[in-house]
Amino acid sequence: MSIERQNIVRNAGFILALLLVFMIGVAARVILIQVKDGEKYKDLSNQITEKVDTIYANKGNVYAADGSLLATSMFRYEIRMDVVTIDNKILQKELPALTKKLSILLDKKSAYYEKRIRDAKLHKNRYLFIAKNLNYPEYSKIRSFPIFNLGANKGGFIAIQKTVREHPLGKVAARTIGYADYRGRPGIEGAFANELKGKNGQRLKQKIAKGQWKPINDDNEVEPKDGKDIITTLDINMQDIAHQALLEQLEKFEADHGSVVLMEVKTGEIKAIANLGRTSKGEYYEDRNYAVYESHEPGSTFKLMSMIVALEDKVIDTATVVDTEHGEWTLYGRKIKDSNHKGYGEISSARALEVSSNVGISKLIYNGYKDNPKKFIKGLRKMNLDQPLGLPIKGEGIPIIPQPGDDSWSGLSLAWMSYGYGVHLTPLQTLTFYNAVANDGKMVKPKFVKEIRYQNNTKWNKVFDTEIINSQICSKSTVKKAKEMLRNVVKRGTASNIYSDSYSIAGKTGTCQAQYWTDSLYYIASFTGFFPVEKPEYSCIVVIHKPTKMGYYGNIVAAPVFKKIAEKIYTATPEIYTVDRIEVPYTSLENSFNKYNIQAQKSYQTMPNVKGMSGMDAISLLENLGLSVQFSGTGAVKNQSVAKGKRIQKGKTVFLTLT
């Protein structure tokens, strides 16, 4: 064997030996990993190919007292397109049909979509945006379109599902219903977020081809628990009445913002609450919950509180005479004036409240408590006027009742606060006091929620009883006097413009000057009261800020809103008197009725004109005619999909557009 051949054999043997040693080392390492670190690497592998997926619980719904849906969770879909996966031949053939259908559904020209899709194909875009915020019917429709109906792999169809919170009534009472998201947790949804959200579940999934995941087991590791439903105290009809009445007045006076709250006297249940602010375009929407958070000087509505304290302390009686002079009184060099610049002369304290005399009320309180102002403050605090209501809804404004020793206290403070300056209350705090007067002195806490309900499982339900803040704010005799004075405010005082022989109202007007930061002085008009006076069922407050047109006094700006609400509620719930049935045959009347009924049935075979009617009334009328009604917006009917006079088809859907 040649030397060269020997060298080759020797080198090959050396390499073979090295390979053998390497293989033995690898085998040893594999055995070591399996024995020592096997579980570690198995877990690491599982982490890459397995994951615990969250199963989101269904969020609970929010309902009105009658079961109407106020807030619910709904699926919304975002549609995208992986243009790369689509075969060129399919794209060329089907693209015109796809873009035509997209144009019809999404209200853009088909050329727009064709250009975008062709550009996306050229640039190999695998995530082209098509549409967002589609509801389920729209999602089902777009999924059936040409190309998209081939699915994800061949048609490039990508659907991203998300859950959004919807308010079926639109913006009506939106700030009170609230939400629990990036904007914070205002309103009922924020207050009861934990109850509504439920508990998420878990499911183990395994990674398969193309980045997709499939469940490993048929059963979930942890089952999700749906959220509980919230049953509010809100009444849909009353809410609609309050909202529209406030909106009309804000528009009429071009005011900055306003609020209305309607409360059930005995229970404290809030039946309606509307808060509307003005945009730069002059439109109104629910932007802040003014009734709950906005603490401001109440003005003349506070005169009732002052009178009750003085009556309880027997500093005055309703017959006590006070000299209002010529509508002006100077105290410590500052003038206190009445709106009636001629004054009222010598009048009783009750009459001073009826005509809302600043001079009369301030004289009565100042002369009665100037030597002991703390006694007056004590009387106000005894009626809980210095305490927040403790609402579940966050953001309640803090009441301010000044007292001697405060930095803001001066010789004028007692007189000023007697007619609502220097003190601060929210509209709901003021209403709660007036509601206590209507309730014979018992102050109850405003209630927004009647019940928390877990589906049909009554075991987990929670019912909210009426909470009493103060069992008796003052004596029964003082309450009786207060009711009579408030009744006379409407009958012959500052609110006589809303008096009616048909129903009884008691209440107090309020007009206050205010100033925010660098703004010039402006007015706050208000009216607070209850009805019917004989047996109060509802209390209500109306507050309108910064009216800029046609007037600013409480009786002109705010009181008419109260009257509209009271009128419509009286009309909707009239007193019914029954008598024993008397069987008397009236043949002629019966024949007339039958003839009329035949005519009526004929007339109801055609579509009535519901334009201008309130949404609630129009829906009720059309449903009684056998029609199905869908609507958008709130307020009065602006448009109807079936024209007046067209023949009615039972079960046909009519679409209404509300203003």
Image: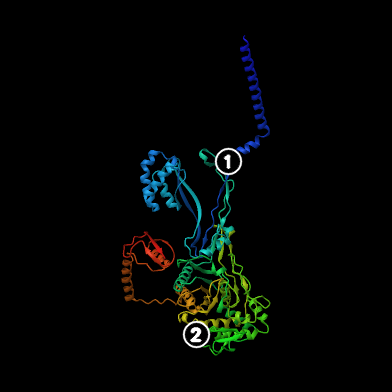
When the figure is inspected, residue 606 is found, relative to residue 344, above or below; the finding is above
Can residue 267 be seen in this snapshot? Answer: no
Image location (x, y in percent) of residue 57: 55, 52
Can residue 29 be seen in this snapshot? Answer: yes
Q: Earlier in the sequence, mark 1 or mark 2?
A: 1
**Circle 2 residue:** 492
The residue under the point 38% across, 47% down is 99
Is disc 1 surrounded by few (<14), some (14 to 19) or many (20+) residues within 10 Å?
A: some
Q: Is residue 440 left or right of residue 372?
A: left
**Circle 1 residue:** 50
Image location (x, y in percent) of residue 8: 61, 15
Type of residue at label 2? Arg
When the figure is inspected, residue 71 is found, relative to residue 21, above or below; the finding is below
> In the orientation shown, which residue stands out farthest toward the top?
1
Q: Quadrant of the C terminus?
A: bottom left
Image location (x, y in percent) of residue 230: 55, 61
